[in-house]
Image: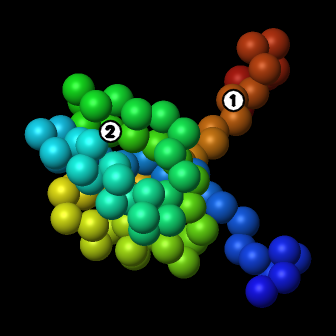
Amino acid sequence: MSEASRPAPVGVILAVDPDRFAEVVEALRRAGLTVTGEQPILGTLHGTVTEDRIPALEAVDGVESVDRERTIQLPPPDSPIQ
């Protein structure tokens, strides 16, 4: 597969079993997740993955949820109220 046809990674936020955090994170890495941040006490992490690998992340034992990151753009403070 050429670089041009490779799907772009999307940001994801995951909730996982905090009691098995390290084990679940390792399984997620094997499933294709590139981890960009971890909060083990909360049982959450975020990273990037290609869209087609999201079902593989959801299937990992110990994963409670997988959500796509969203970007919200607020208007500048001096803009008129809409």
Q: Residue at x 38, y 66 (%)?
A: 57
| Label 1 crowd bin: few (<14), some (14–19), many (20+), radius 10 Å | few
Q: CA distance from mark 1 to mark 2?
A: 26 Å
Secondary structure state at the residue bearing disc 2: strand
Residue behind mark 1: 74
Please, is residue 1 above or below residue 30 in the view? below
Residue at 18%, 39% (x, y): give it.
18
- Of badges 1 and 2, the one in the foreground is 2
Residue 50: % across, % down: 60, 68
Residue 35 visible in the snapshot: yes
For marks 1 and 2, the one nearer the N-term is 2
Q: Is residue 30 left or right of residue 60?
A: right
Above or below, 21 relative to 49: above
Q: Is residue 77 above or below residue 81?
A: above
Q: Is residue 28 above or below residue 75?
A: below
Q: Position of residue 23 (x, y in %)?
A: 24, 50
> Which of the labelled discs sits on residue 44, or is there none?
2
